[in-house]
Image (tube, grey):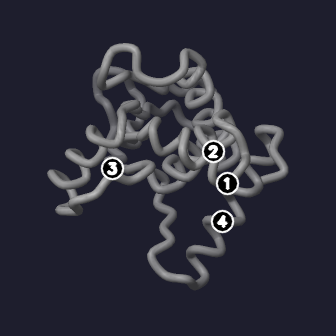
Amino acid sequence: MTHKIYVSRQKRGLGRPETAALVKKAAAVALRCEGMDEPCEISVTLTDDAGIHAINLENRGVDAATDVLSFPIDEPDLDTGCRFLGDMVLSLEHVTAQAEEYGGGYAHEAQYLTVHSVLHLLGYDHLDEGEEKARMRAREKAIMKELGYDF
């Protein structure tokens, strides 16, 4: 199955050169693991903390930077025949900081946040500490294992 994962940088020269490839691979593996058997599209914007802060404030009324934002759309694209799942915004400053904080490395953190966001685009949530959060965490762990991580 060919899915289209579009990655753009909000600012020129932002982040590491390999980030787009890491994001595309993680998104594709997440979609495959979740059984997405129809062509779909995801738009990913790579930004910094200032960029994600502005988007978070404008779209969610939250006056803070965060690591990743997911905006599910899930509509058919009549021009391409693909299902447009939505938009993802990833703060590369948060990726770098959390990679250091959690010790998993840059690639692990970029791919984990991508998997996390793709699951949100597919309808998963973790607003409480209950069953839904446990279900989402289990899927993240399984997908990260497919990417070669022991989580």
| Residue on which disc 1 sits | 102
Callout 3 crowding tier (Cα within 10 Å): few <14, some 14–19, many ≥20: some
Q: Quadrant of residue 37?
A: top right
| Residue on which disc 3 sits | 71
Mark 4 to mark 2 CA distance (whole Å): 18 Å
Mark 1 to mark 3 CA distance (whole Å): 26 Å
Q: Given the image, on which type of amino acid does mark 2 rest?
A: Ala
The circle on residue 99 is 2
Q: Which element is circle 3 on?
A: strand
Q: Given the image, on which type of amino acid does mark 3 rest?
A: Phe
Q: Residue at x 55, y 83 (%)?
A: 129
Taking depth in this image into account, of 92 and 45 the one nearest to the observer is 92
Q: Which element is circle 1 on?
A: helix
Q: Given the image, on which type of amino acid does mark 1 rest?
A: Tyr
Q: Quadrant of residue 77?
A: top left
Q: Earlier in the sequence, mark 1 or mark 3?
A: 3
Q: Earlier in the sequence, mark 1 or mark 4?
A: 1
| Residue on which disc 4 sits | 137
Q: Earlier in the sequence, mark 4 or mark 2?
A: 2
Position of residue 46 measured from the top left corner of the image (x, y, whole percent): 40, 30
Position of residue 73 measured from the top left corner of the image (x, y, whole percent): 32, 47
Q: Residue at x 48, y 24 (%)?
A: 15
Position of residue 105 measured from the top left corner of the image (x, y, whole percent): 70, 39
Q: Nearer the viewer, mark 1 or mark 3?
A: 1
Mark 4 to mark 3 CA distance (whole Å): 19 Å
Is 75 above or below relative to 120? above
Q: Which image quarter is the N terminus in?
A: top right
Q: Which element is circle 2 on?
A: helix
